[in-house]
Amino acid sequence: MNREEKQALVDELSEKFQSHNSFYIVDASVMSVAKINEFRRLCFNRGMEYKVYKNTFIRKAMDTLGHDTSEMDAALKGQSGVLFSQESGSAPAKLLRDFYKSQAYGRNVTPKPVLKGAYVDASIYVGSDQLEGLTTLKGKQELLGELIGLLQSPAKNVISALQSGGNKLAGILKTLSEKEEAAV
């Protein structure tokens, strides 16, 4: 591969990094071809992409992100594949967790592909021990929905109180008018 081809590959990778909210770096080196194909199919079905790159290409492409990504250097050892997601930052973590469950790994067996690092909305997570925390991350849409719900809650309470108060007042007036008619 000549210099121009390498630069084109780094440019392509940096464009993907810029256009995706999150990406995960995983190691699938000891997986069989059939298992890797099964993993790629699962990625495709969930709208994600998995591709293997050289660590030097990943490092050069991450340098174009405009954030300090030096913490990810620990993840760039051995074989590295990149899992891209347009969705929330937790979607790839959930995909990995579901893939592990479908493979029924034993207690002493390290599940593959191994999470080496993740970049989610300019936050960096390094190590496979971060997977469970990454599955609970809420996406931008989920957070906005919760925020709108919290903002609407006080207004709904006020409207509800006014409506119930109005109904009580109407009930009291109706009862008083019925008593007056009965008295006459």
Image (cartoon, helix red, strand yellow):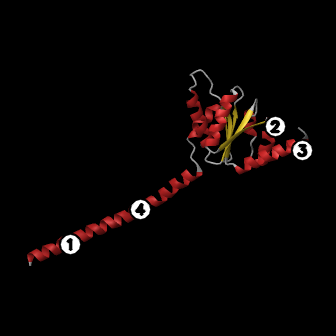
Which quarter of the figure is the N terminus placed in? top right
Query: Picture coordinates of residue 46 (x, y %)?
Result: 61, 43
Query: Picture coordinates of residue 121 (x, y %)?
Result: 66, 48
Q: Earlier in the sequence, mark 2 or mark 1?
A: 2
Task: Name the side, left or right, on which 45 lies relative to 74.
Answer: left
Quick check: marks 1 and 3 in contact, CB under 8 Å? no
For label 3, the residue is: 4
Query: Amino acid type of disc 4?
Result: Lys
For label 2, the residue is: 56
Q: CA distance from mark 1 to mark 3?
A: 87 Å
For label 1, the residue is: 174
Q: Residues within 10 Å of mark 3 (few under 14, many from 20)?
A: few
Of discs 1 and 3, which sits in the foreground?
3
Query: Amino acid type of disc 3?
Result: Glu
Query: Amino acid type of disc 1?
Result: Lys
**Residue at image point 54% right, 51% down:** 142
Q: Earlier in the sequence, mark 4 or mark 2?
A: 2
Q: Secondary structure at mark 1?
A: helix
Q: Earlier in the sequence, mark 2 or mark 3?
A: 3
Q: CA distance from mark 3 to mark 4?
A: 61 Å
Which quarter of the figure is the C terminus placed in? bottom left
Q: Secondary structure at mark 4?
A: helix
Of discs 2 and 3, which sits in the foreground?
3
Of discs 4 and 2, which sits in the foreground?
2
Among the 4 quarters of the image, the one containing residue 120: top right
For label 4, the residue is: 156
Q: CA distance from mark 2 to mark 1?
A: 81 Å
Question: Against 153, is 93 above or below?
Answer: above
